[in-house]
Image (spheres, rainbow, N blue to C red):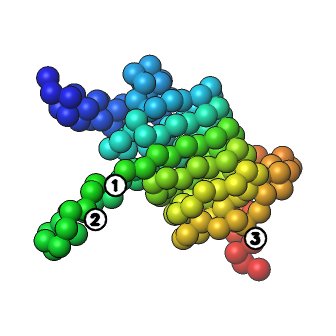
Amino acid sequence: MKKYTKKQLTRLRIALIFESKKRTQYIIKHNIFKSVGKNFFFQPRMIPSDPELIKFHDNVTVASNVTFINHDLVNNVLNNLNDGFYEYQKGCIEIMDNVFIGSGTIILPNIKIGPNVIIAAGSVVTKDIKENTVVAGIPAKAIGTFDEYKEKRKTHKDLETEELWRKFDNEKNK
């Protein structure tokens, strides 16, 4: 079987594993990414087209629908101008220890995310993120520190469903 076909079948197999924990175990067992550290959790059903260009260190959680972009196809357009040759561009992504990547985040090529980082849902990461940072937005910008966020969440009370709705209604009806 051609390498390309095998790669596509592996991607399809991963997409068909419905339970995130089992999908993560499959990814680790089959060495899908360049490297994966301890306590890794990968919720997306789609694997990036160049997973060998991504490294995850210890204690990393990737929420649903995160997109890792390791290349661009601008060369297709530029080469059609017939004024020179433009190469296909690829880049690596490295995620250090203790990182949470929120749902719907997009991470561009040649990005290093430092340790102790939280990336809010829907962010677009266009440049490296330094350690101990919480980022959000398009493009992602620092909105706080990891340590501040950790302290805030430490005091968060886990409420039951009805309590959550009462709290929601009280806050929205003020």
Provide residue 133's location: percent of width, then percent of height.
Answer: 73, 56
Provide residue 167's location: percent of width, then percent of height.
Answer: 75, 63
Say few, some or many: other residues with alpha carbon within 10 Å of mark 1 (under 14 / 14 to 19 / 20 or more).
few
Point 65% across, 67% down: residue: 141
Q: Is residue 152 visible?
A: no
Q: Amino acid at mark 2?
A: Val
Read off the residue under disc 2. Answer: 74
Above or below residue 165? Residue 101 is above
Q: Amino acid at mark 3?
A: Asn
Q: Secondary structure at mark 1?
A: strand
Q: Amino acid at mark 1?
A: Gln
Q: Earlier in the sequence, mark 2 or mark 1?
A: 2
Image mark for residue 89: 1
Nearer the observer, 75 or 6: 75
Q: Dividing the image into 4 quarters, which one contains the C terminus?
A: bottom right
Provide residue 30's location: percent of width, then percent of height.
Answer: 39, 22
CB within 8 Å, label 2 to label 1: yes
> Label 2 vs label 1: CA separation?
8 Å
> Label 2 vs label 3: CA separation?
50 Å
Provide residue 135's location: percent of width, then percent of height.
Answer: 66, 61
Image mark for residue 127: none
Say few, some or many: other residues with alpha carbon within 10 Å of mark 3 (under 14 / 14 to 19 / 20 or more).
few
Q: Earlier in the sequence, mark 3 or mark 1?
A: 1
Q: Secondary structure at mark 3?
A: helix
> Label 3 vs label 1: CA separation?
51 Å
Image mark for residue 170: 3
Give the left or right position of residue 34, taking residue 86 as reference. right
Q: Earlier in the sequence, mark 2 or mark 3?
A: 2
Point 28% across, 30% down: residue: 10
Give the left or right position of residue 133, taking residue 28 as reference. right
Q: Secondary structure at mark 2?
A: helix
Say few, some or many: other residues with alpha carbon within 10 Å of mark 2 (under 14 / 14 to 19 / 20 or more).
few
